[in-house]
Amino acid sequence: MAQGPLLETNSPLSAEQAEQLNTLVGSLRNDQMTWLSGYLAGLSAASGSAANTEPRPQSAAGTQPELTILYGSQTGNAEGVAELAAERAEARGFSVRRADMADFGKKDFKTITNLLVVVSTHGEGEPPDTAEPLHELLNGRKAPKLADSRFAVLALGDSSYEHFCQTGRDFDARLTELGAERIHERLDCDVDYEEPAAQWVDSVLERFSELAGASAPATSNVIPMAEARGTARWDRKNPFPAEVLENVLLNGRGSDKETRHIELSLEGSGLTFEPGDALGVVPENNPALVEELLAATGLDGEADLEDGTPLAEALTRHYEITTLTRPFLERWAELSGAEELAALLGEATRDELRSYLEGRQIIDVVSDYPVEGLDAETFVAALRRLPPRLYSIASSQRADEDEVHITVAVVRYESHGRSREGVASTHLADRLEPGQKVGVYADRNKNFKLPADPQAPAIMIGPGTGVAPFRAFLAEREETGAEGNNWLFFGDRRFQTDFLYQTDFLAWRDRGVLDRIEVAFSRDGDEKVYVQDRLRENGAELFSWLQAGAHLYVCGDAERMAPDVHQALLEIVQEHGGHDAEGAKEYLRGLQQAKRYQRDVY
């Protein structure tokens, strides 16, 4: 009896796994399928036997208590915490189901007793792309009743954003409203999240264990965060010192933008990555800003902190000294006694706070509101750790084995009478020449990957530095001989000065790797033209590509570009697919769930 294709709705597989298996099965002869079925049956039996050779800790009732770990991740951090939690829960005797929110629906809540949620916040208080459908479900009229469930929520975010950890707050509040019992207080983690997240996981699992009667783990069973994530020995805490090979300005003379192409050596590191991944760069602060900050606070840069590090070195390498966050303002208002700062932090003055933060940095606050008798330890305690910066990788490791390339938009601007600059971008652009080194590590992004099927077409939308991963995509598809068609939409300000990687893309077009390229240069004509305008102009053909199985990728600015592109796609689906507004929304959501519409926006 013939069967239809496997889907995530008719199998226990994820959408990506189902797609991969359908592709494989479709290429097999009958004798190959017979052999494969026997092989998988034997593999399953061997795996089951091996899994049962060592007894697991059990609950008081003699069976393993169940725990569902649900994660929503944009860049992989929440997924990494979920992996850590799963390892430690299994060590405690739990039967663990770890699930991406993208693969979780209403029916999955029916059997949940114990639920641990790890979710990041993206943009201005929004859920990650993969978590949007579940977030919408739980906040809608069709939300499940959860009176028999217990839960705890870990929220990841960035305190420099107004709606810090908003998605985690949403899940925490909504699960309670739906009847679930909160068994542990929510933890809101900032960018330096690993240690507090690991401690929270242990505390929550201890509580779940008490409620379920599970055994405590042996000390040797506790898995470190890096090991749980399956990372190499190089990570954000221990980056690889990569040598700069090239540092090239991509913009032409007369451009009002500064974009750098930077090539780094990974020789001897053992680091691996795939197109769609990011490179974590561990920057240093500008020494000139450190000196200005020391002068404003009256602190001695040579004074040692408790760990023996001189203050100036700590401010240069370890602490965030530019970005203003609410926690810093709260602490500085307390230290300085400044009534003006305290007044900004009330619920009724959110607009005033937003206006104050715009264009200001830490140097403005410490200069305007000095603290008498400030000591070094008190000052650094008010700061957060200097977070790495993530850059989309612009190269294929298959094509350039011992190298990694990134595309860097250099940030410089004036505000409130001061010159400002981006921490990492100017560190890379101004203070690193070929031969010098910078700390890096590979940051996985499982939600932004080339099609598993090399025959599948790819539509890539990447204005400005958002084009970086598509340079990697095309290099990879050429190197692997992938036959799927490729269509690139690129935009920037001016054709003559801002056509990033023009030579590369035109060469790929000439060699037949890049089938189509549409460009939009917003400052070259009387009217501004953007990539979303080019999408609408090519709407009929773009929709036909989607109907033929094309994968759609968007990379770049999250605040304006990504919403504008999404709106254009909705209009295209309505006009050329015959859908109404709700139908177009469901069409794109279906592409997202099938991992055929992926975004890497920031």
Image (tube, rainbow, N blue to C red):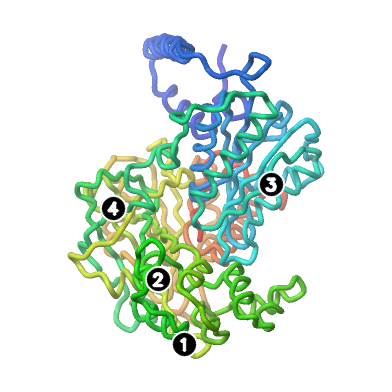
Disc nearer the start of the sequence (3/1): 3
Disc nearer the start of the sequence (1/2): 2
In this view, the residue in front, 263 or 457, is: 263
In the drawing, does residue 175 fall left or right of residue 37? right
Q: Amino acid at mark 4?
A: Phe
Residue at the image position 53 percent from the left and 69 percent from the top: 382
Contact between labelled residues 2 and 4, with CB atoms less than 8 Å apart: no
Rounded to the nearest angstrom, the CA distance separating label 4 from label 2 is 21 Å
Indicate whether 73 appears above or below 363.
above
Contact between labelled residues 2 and 3, with CB atoms less than 8 Å apart: no
- Disc 1 or disc 2, which is closer to the eye? 2
Helix, strand or loop at label 1? It is strand
Rounded to the nearest angstrom, the CA distance separating label 4 from label 1 is 34 Å
Disc nearer the start of the sequence (3/2): 3
In this view, the residue in front, 158 or 573, is: 158
Indicate whether 385 appears above or below 250.
above
Disc nearer the start of the sequence (4/1): 4
Report the residue marked by disc 3. Answer: 185
Report the residue marked by disc 4. Answer: 240
Q: Position of residue 201 (x, y in %)?
A: 57, 40
Q: Mark 2: few, some, or many residues within 10 Å (few <14, many ≥20)? A: many
Report the residue marked by disc 2. Answer: 315
In the drawing, does residue 481 fall left or right of residue 211? left
Q: Position of residue 138 (x, y in %)?
A: 74, 43
Q: Amino acid at mark 1?
A: Arg
Residue at the image position 45 percent from the left and 11 percent from the top: 53
- Disc 3 or disc 1, which is closer to the eye? 3
Q: Amino acid at mark 3?
A: Glu
Contact between labelled residues 1 and 3, with CB atoms less than 8 Å apart: no
Q: Position of residue 34 (x, y in %)?
A: 41, 9
Residue at the image position 54 percent from the left and 84 percent from the top: 372
